[in-house]
Image: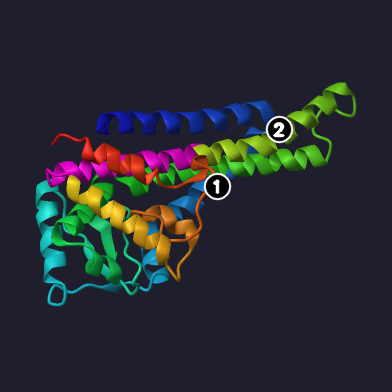
Amino acid sequence: MGFFNQVKTVLLLGALTGLLLFIGNLLGGMQGLTIAFLFSVLMNVGMYWFSDKIVLMMYRAREATKKDYPEYHAMIEDICKKAGLPKPKLYIVPSTTPNAFATGRSPKHAAVACTEGILQLLNKEELRGVLSHEMSHVKNRDILITTIAATIAGVISYVAMMARWAAIFGGMGGRDNNGRGNILGFLVIAILAPIIALILQLAISRSREYLADHTGAKLIKNPLPLADALQKLETANKHHPMKFGNPATSSLFIVNPFSGRALLQLFSTHPPLAERVRRLREMRV
């Protein structure tokens, strides 16, 4: 299952890249495409390097000292030893909403944050399952992968915006039938391309969640505590959603911490919880 999710990620990234090349070739504006690409890369590289600090500040996270949170540190140290990873910095988010997330651009610059609520809600084994999931995100370099996906999707959005302006100002080819055909083509690109890019980007996010579930369960050689934890967390987050932060960061958390739910599964940052739990309970480690 882990290998399948890795292959799925590669295919989805390939589809995103293919969509970008297709619309770039269709528009013929390679100079504009190059400018948009460079701008998007610079923007996302900046986010890649500084997003951990931004997110930790956004959620008012404070560093969790070993003196105050010995079990938290002991669990992470044990998981890191099993995974062959350096120990990340540990943080506490001052919220009763039970949740957790990992961030950082590489295993050497990683951070794991738990809310006060999750430390109170879960038992030791369930918390260990959640922390193994978060360290799996670090091990699988999901921050890098999602940044690449965001970069490509961002370029597609810029190209779609170019297509929209091209349609507004008459496109290329004059006012004959060919010109009208170009305008229609630009409008189709402007409307559909960002939607398709978003769907592919979110599919990548969901595939990485499945992979982190799988990798985390294998790290501690038991998928059941994580399955139990996910069910508790889903229920608790629906009844007591996060009161601060930004829904745009919901994909970072192990379950969606906000009350708003996607109208369509295609536009969800997380896989269906029932499916995640089913896969974990059927795992053999």
Is 9 situated above or below 250?
Answer: above
What is the C-alpha distance between the residues marked 1 and 2? Answer: 23 Å
Assign a secondary structure to mark 2.
Answer: helix
| Image coords of residue 27 (percent x, y) | 68, 30
Asked whether, in this view, residue 10 is left or right of residue 138, the answer is: right
Asked whether, in this view, residue 99 is left or right of residue 261, the answer is: left
Three-letter code, disc 2: Val
Quarter of the figure with the C terminus: top left
Read off the residue under disc 2: 188
Outermost right residue: 175
| Residue drawn at x 50%, y 33% as measured from the top left | 16
Disc 2 crowd rating (10 Å Cα; few below 14, some 14-19, many 20+) is: some
Q: What stretch is highlighted in magenta?
A: 200-223
Quarter of the figure with the N terminus: top left
Looking at marks 1 and 2 on the same chain, the residue that comes earlier in the sequence is marked by 2
Asked whether, in this view, residue 115 is left or right of residue 55, the answer is: left
Three-letter code, disc 1: Leu
| Image coords of residue 92 (percent x, y) | 28, 71
Read off the residue under disc 1: 263
| Residue drawn at x 48%, y 41% as measured from the top left | 201
Q: Considering the whole magenta stretch, tell me its main secondary structure.
A: helix
Which of the labelled discs sits on residue 233, or is there none? none
**Front-most of residues 58 and 51:** 58
